[in-house]
Image: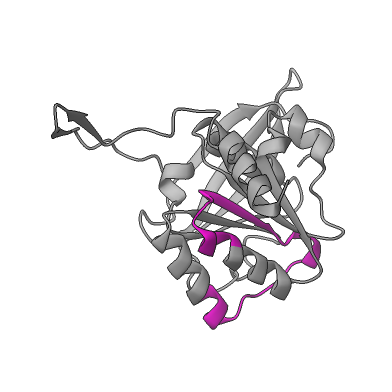
Amino acid sequence: MGHKDDVERFLARARGGGSGGAATALAVAGDVIALPEVEVAPWGLAALRGRLVELSARGASAVLTTAIELVCEAQQAAEPAAWVTLSGGSFYPPDAADCGVDLAALVVVRVTSAITAARAAERLLRSGAFGLVVMDLVELGIDPRLAMATQGRLVTLAQAHDAALVCLTDKPNESPSLGSLVSLRAAALRTRTASGELGVTLRALKDKRRGPDWQRARRRRGPAGYG
């Protein structure tokens, strides 16, 4: 089987596991009936489309758990997802599968630097095939940066293809974001309840659409290997 057949088979699997997302209009007997606007939550695939997003934390981080949650959301909506990670990165397939990720419907690209990670993300976005691309830069430490030209290309492609690009970093809240074109930066922290349940608090540090004044707390189950 050729490369083209492999890609078509992957996309068919990735797009066949959900309803394709919420519809905004219905076609009835050739007419289009507009549905009322629904307020979009500050976090989630719908809120992140067309944006360069940074998800960061230091210490009791829940960055990976939150990113895996987005992958699951994309797959449930039949949106192909990709994960770009450095060769020694923290993506661990068994833990991802334990969280509900369909590994056969997830593209994982391993690279050697932030530059090659950005190039891989550009190619994935340019294809127009992916609704979510995660760029895992956690291994680089507290101050990875993306050049302005790189940010511009990534944002343009995310907007053109209505895709979410989420960059994962490991740094404290007071550190600067990846760059000025980051539309949303959120901190994801892990807590434990008295009963041992995992709690994840997501707090906006920068949000050009809503302002950095929101946070979301949820109970989550994550395997031991994920933060």
Q: Residue furthest top?
A: 195
Residue depicted at x 60% and y 34%:
13
Q: Pick the residue in front: 160 or 94.
A: 160
Residue 66 position in % (x across, y down): 63, 41
Q: Is residue 25 magenta?
A: no
Is 105 above or below relative to 155? above
Residue 15 position in % (x across, y down): 53, 36
Q: Pick the residue in front: 91 or 12.
A: 12
Q: Quadrant of residue 200?
A: top right
Is 120 above or below relative to 128? below
The way the protein has been coloured in the rendering is: one colour
Q: Is residue 144 magenta?
A: yes
Q: Quadrant of residue 31?
A: top left
Q: Quadrant of the C terminus?
A: top right
Residue depicted at x 62% and y 26%:
219
Residue 170 position in % (x across, y down): 73, 59
Q: Quadrant of the N terminus?
A: top right
Q: Residue furthest right?
A: 88
- Left or right: where does residue 93 sit relative to residue 116? right
Report the span colored magenta.
124-151
Q: Is residue 178 visible?
A: yes
Is 132 above or below relative to 137? above
Q: Pick the residue in front: 154 or 47.
A: 154
Residue depicted at x 45% and y 59%:
51
- Left or right: where does residue 129 sit relative to residue 55? left
